[in-house]
Image (spheres, helix red, strand yellow):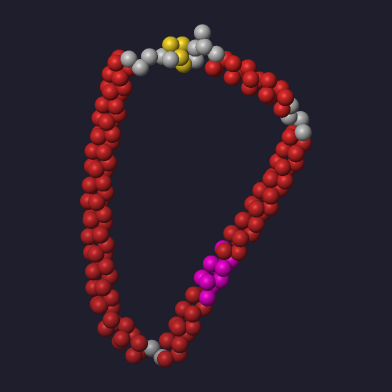
Amino acid sequence: MFLCKRPFSSADGSAKASERRLDFERDQIDGELKETEELLGAMEREVRHLLAGRTKVSDEIARIQGMLRPVRAAAASVLPPEIAVLDVETGRLEERLHQLQRIKASLDKRETLGQQITQIQQEVAALEAEVRVNSGNIDFLDAAHSAAGWHEYVFESD
């Protein structure tokens, strides 16, 4: 059997080399698997730690809100009712402002995407024109003769 006009044998020597290579690859994969398992364990410990911290923070927020409840009730009874109405109106207007800012950001993104699409369409049109111009210049006969030469080189045996 020949490969690039050179003898190629599938003797036991190449089988042994292939077996050694497979053993090496198996060892590599085993090492990577162990490393991945260690990383996964470390990530699981980190997630547990972060969840415990999150629980502590949530408990602290609930405790502080509980402490503020009587103060809020006392302040609400002392303040005139108009302040509560104004506070609600202020909150509504702030939320509307945030909503309008999100809409503006969305429209800005849409404008940017539209400009990028237009630019890409122009590039595509230019490339298509270049392909049309260059496709007429291809010499298929010369390419066929070149391919025939390669065919003879590859499949010709000594």
Q: Main secondary structure of the magenta part?
A: helix
Q: Position of residue 110 (x, y in %)?
A: 61, 60
- Residue situated in front as seen by the camera: 108 or 16: 16
Residue 17 in view (yes/no): no
What residue is rendered at 68% in x and 52% in y?
Answer: 118
What residue is rendered at 73% in x and 29% in y?
Answer: 138
**Which stretch did the figure color magenta?**
96-105
- Residue situated in front as seen by the camera: 103 or 151: 151
Judged from this view, the residue extending furthest toward the top is 158
Q: Where is residue 2 in the image (x, y as percent from the top left)?
A: 46, 14
Give the answer, above or below, for where 29 lies relative to 125: above
What residue is rendered at 42% in x and 91% in y?
Answer: 81
Residue 69 in view (yes/no): yes
In the picture, the quarter occupied by the N terminus is: top left
Residue 33 position by quadrant = top left
What residue is rendered at 35% in x and 90% in y?
Answer: 78
Residue 11 position by quadrant = top left
Is residue 110 left or right of 75 when viewed as pictured? right
Give the answer, above or below, for where 60 lies relative to 136: below
